Image: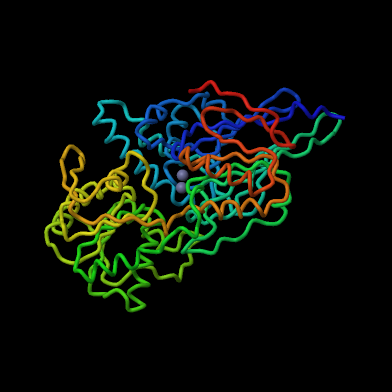
Amino acid sequence: MGNTCRFYVDLMALQREVTGSCILNVIKFPDGTTKKLLIDCGLFQEKDYSDYNKTFPFNPEDIDYVIVTHNHVDHTGRLPLLVSLGYSNKIHTTYDTSQLIGHALHDSYKVLKRKAKLANERSLYTDEDVDSTLSLIEAHPFDEPIKLDENVTLTFFMNGHLPGAALVLVQVDYSDDSNYKHPTINLLFTGDYNNKNMFFNVSPIPEWVHNLPITIIQETTYGDMDSSQIEEVFESNILDAINKKKEIVIPVFSLGRSQEIMYFLMKMQNEGKLDPNIPIYFDGKLGIKYTELYKSGSLKSIDKTKDFLPQNFSYVDSPEMRLGLTNDYQTKIILTTSGMGSYGPAQFYLPAFLQHSNALIHFTGYVAEDTLGRRLYDCNKGEIVEIGGLQVKKEADVKFTSEFSAHAKGDELINFLKDFSNIRLLLLNHGETASENYYASKVINEVKIKNVGILGRDYLFRVNEYGLIKSFSTKFL
Ligand SMILES: [Zn+2]
Ligand SMILES: [Zn+2]
C-alpha cells in the first residue's frame, strides 16, 4: 500500500480582505515532486495594502498553472506583473472571460500608469506585458473536466457573479509505482459567487460534485448579511427623485452592473413607471466597450435576443458633453463608472453633483473602504468632504442599495454549502474581517463541517483527501 501521508496540498492566500485575490496551491506528491497552481492573481485596491501589489512571495517562474475565476481586476489585475516576472505557462479561463479580460487588463494598465506617474514611480507593468499575458490565455467551456496533466484536472462550473464567472474545481490524483491510486484531493474555489444573474440562467452544480469529499474555499463579501435584510429601494428612490425633477447620478461597475441598471431602467420604462422622455446617459470608456460586447452576441452566456438598452439612451462621447450635463440642471439620469466612485468619469461627476442640492447620487453596490463612495456614505448632508484636494459641501442626496449585489448573502452562502454531503474543510476568504468572523460562527452553528478556517496572509492550510492535516503561520507578511 502506498504512503498516504505525503500527498497533500498547501493552500495560502495573498489577500488580506476583499481585494488582491490570489491563492497559491503547492501540491506535494509522494515521490517528492511538487506542482504549483495559482487561483486568480488580483490587484489590491485598498490603500493600506497597495505595497502588496509590488511583489510576489514566490517565484513566478516556478508556477505551473494559473486559473482565473472571473474578469474583475481584484482577481486578474496582477497577471501581467506575474508574466513580466517570468510566468510563461498557460492561463486557464472560461470562454466569456477570455473575451472580456483583454479590455479589463488594458484598462488596468492605463489606470496604473496614471497612478505611477503621479507617485513618480514605475508602473507595475507595461502594455506589452498585457499582450504577453493575453497570449497565454486558454479558454474552456463549463462542466467539462480538463486534464491539465496526469495529476491535475480542472472543471469550470457556471456562476451568476458575472458573464464568464466560474466556480473552479481542482482535482489532484496520484498513482505510485506499484499502481496504487491515492484517493483524489478535491478543492472547490467559489471565486466571487452569486446564485443568480439578470442576463442568464445559472445552471446548478452537477450532483457528482455535491457528493465528493471536498475542501471548499468560499467567498464571504456579504457573509454578515441575510438576503431578507436587502431592501429593494432603488426603483422608488429613482421615481421619487424624478417626481421632484432631480438630476440623478448612478455610479456603476463597468461590467455587469452597468448593463443590469440599463436593463432595469428599460423595464421601468416598459412598465410605464419611468417617463421615456427623461434622457439617460452612460459615461465610461470600458463600460461602453462591455455594453457593445453584450449587444454583439459574442458572449456565450448572454441571451442574444435580450434587449437591455432603455429608450432615450446615449453614450457620453466628449468632455464637452460631460461638462454640459453638469451645468444644464435638467432632470436626467447619468450612469457613470466606476461603481465605487474612485475611478473613471465618476471622479468628475461626483464632486460636481454633490454640490447640487437638486441632485441624487445613488450607489448600486458594495463600496470598499478608502473609496469615494464609502466616504460619501460615512458623512452627513451639509458636511464638507475632501475630494481630490477640493473641499466639497455635501448638498445632494446620497443613497445606497445592495439589491443588485453580485455576491450571494450569508443565508445563500449557507444554502450553497448544505447541498454538499461531505465537506472536509471550509476555508473562508474575500470578506472584511468582521464579516468573515460573523459568517464563520454562522457556518459552525448551521452546517456540519469538521473544520472551518479563514484563508488570508496569516496561515497556510495543509490539506489532503481527508481534509485538514494542520495549519501553519505563513512567513510572507
Ligand atoms: Zn472579488
Ligand atoms: Zn468579482
Colour scheme: rainbow
Residue at 32% of width from left, 49% of height from top? Answer: 338
On screen, 207 above or below 80?
A: below
Query: Percent position (x, y) of residue 14?
Result: 50, 31
Q: Nearer the viewer, residue 303 or 244?
A: 244
Q: Position of residue 360 (x, y in %)?
A: 24, 59
Residue at the image position 19 percent from the left and 52 percent from the top: 354
x, y percent for residue 247:
20, 62
Q: Is residue 281 left or right of residue 187?
A: left
Residue at coordinates 39% horizontally, 30% vertically from top-left? 49
Residue 435 location (% of width, % of height): 49, 43
- For this orientation, the residue located farthest to the bottom is 272
Residue drawn at the location 28% of the way across and 34% of the way down: 115
Q: Is residue 422 left or right of residue 37?
A: right
Please identify the quarter of the rendering in which residue 138 is found.
top right
Count the numbered circles shown: 0
- Which residue is nearer to you in this view: 236 or 466? 236
Does the rendering let one see residue 71?
A: no
Q: Pick out the residue farthest to the left.
A: 327
- Is residue 440 visible to us here? yes
Quick check: 158 above or below 466?
below
